Amino acid sequence: MNDLDTKPPETVVDLRGVTRRFGPTTALDDVSLSVPRGTVFGLVGVNGAGKTTLIKHVLGLLRAQTGSVRVFGLDPVADPVGVLSKIGYLSEDKDLPDWMRVDELLHYNRAFYPSWDDRYAEQLRRTFELDSAKQIKQLSRGQRARAGLLAALAHRPEILVLDEPSSGLDPIVRRDILTAIIRTISDEGRTVLFSSHLLEEVERVSDYVAMIDEGRIVLCDRLEQIKDSFHCLTLRFDAPQSDPPTVPGALGWKGADQEWTAVCNGRLEELQAAAAEAGARIVGQRVPSLDEIFVARVGRTCPASDEE
Amino acid sequence: MQIHISANDGVPIYLQIVNQVKYLVASGRLAPGEELPPIRVLAEQLLVNPNTVARAYRELETAGLVTKRRTAGTYVSDAGSPLARRQRVKILTERVDALLAEARQLDVAVDEVVELIRQQDEKMQLGPKAGETP
């Protein structure tokens, strides 16, 4: 396992100033991010925020209109073989050749990857209870996802790239996916880049989180750092207030009269001082969940979270 | 080792692990000298990032609750018992603080609260049925 505190991270995926337009729509707007080796990097945003477009640039399926994309220092469009041989990829639609049987799918995939591990593939097939003789189109949604996961894992990729891996899946298959993520980084030096709108899962497994909204990265940092720099504060005033309090870093107040609550960005001491200056006492203080931070920062909920 | 993680309530996951291991030690469900699961095993069991488990173990080591034996694993410290007592008192103190805050909010005097605790304790000793709270 990679100890983040002692080793200077080496960048596996590097995007610099990537912009992508589809007609009048700007899908990615000046996106820069770095995925350090040996970490789990979670990409979060609502549907249509640009997560899949970003991942397609990493895979070399889309060419950057401006800016640069490097994966292991290589340009994935110019050198698809060099890049893709090191990537294990599971798409959101789990698009697999429907007409193939499970054993044919494995045989087909192993031809592309010199590092394909037959024993590991067989071990995963048994764990996932996939029937070799079954056609892909006969598989249930969950089994289809497991077949896709197997195909992404069996060549022991240096980076596992998962686009909305859990969407529409039952908890048991979601568990398999999280386990795959954890096992991948437990092995020295391997890296995971995944997108999700299930922030509870992202919070569980990520070292780094990037929030993307309307094609822009609005927040990108170590998850620990993000959790340290946001506070959910409840302020109480001696007299009813007609307007929300003014505290720098506060992201959307809820409440009325004497008591107001908000997720605030900043150092706690400074927020406390600002609250005192506004004439309020802090009566409640806790660490917000990633979901709450996302809602506060992006101003809307992810489709999967039903709150609000 | 039974630990339950919730990624919804905001408490950092490493801290949830630290707190629950402290509870397990304090309540005797983890005995001095007992080995904690290896980092990757616990990470897979809890479905959390192994770096998070590593951080929790580091914090527990700093707090003196566990010791690392070279590369052989992480064990509950032999000095667990006096620490455990202090830990138990600390846990209770937090509860008492919450209780006192609520009492003050409801305008109930401290003496009344203490009397109430005594009454409830007597009821509890009479058996679970008599101890039922409304």
Image (tube, grey):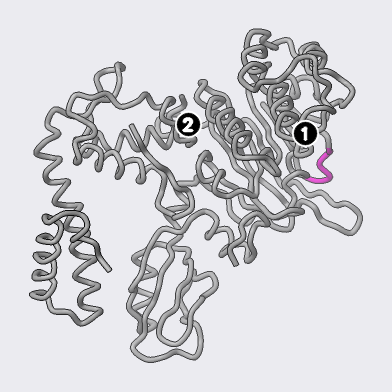
Q: Is residue A1 above or below residue A301?
A: above
Q: Main secondary structure of the magenta part?
A: loop
Q: Amino acid at mark 2?
A: Pro
**Callout 2: residue from which chain?**
A
SS at mark 2?
loop
Residue A29 seen in render: no
- Image coordinates of residue A102 in percent, x first then y, are 78, 18
Residue carrying label 1: A94
Which of A106/B99 is in front? B99
Q: Which residues are magenta?
A: A62-66
Q: Amino acid at mark 1?
A: Lys
* B57 vs A108: above or below: below
Q: Nearer the viewer, residue B90 or A102?
A: A102
Say if B44 sits above or below A26 in the image.
above
User: Furthest-top residue in view?
Assistant: A119
**Figure quadrant of residue B133:** bottom left
> Is residue A267 part of the magenta span, yes or no?
no
The 10 Å Cα crowd at callout 2, few under 14, some 14 to 19, many 20 or more, is few
The disc placed on residue A8 is: 2
Pointer 2 and pointer 1 on the same chain: yes
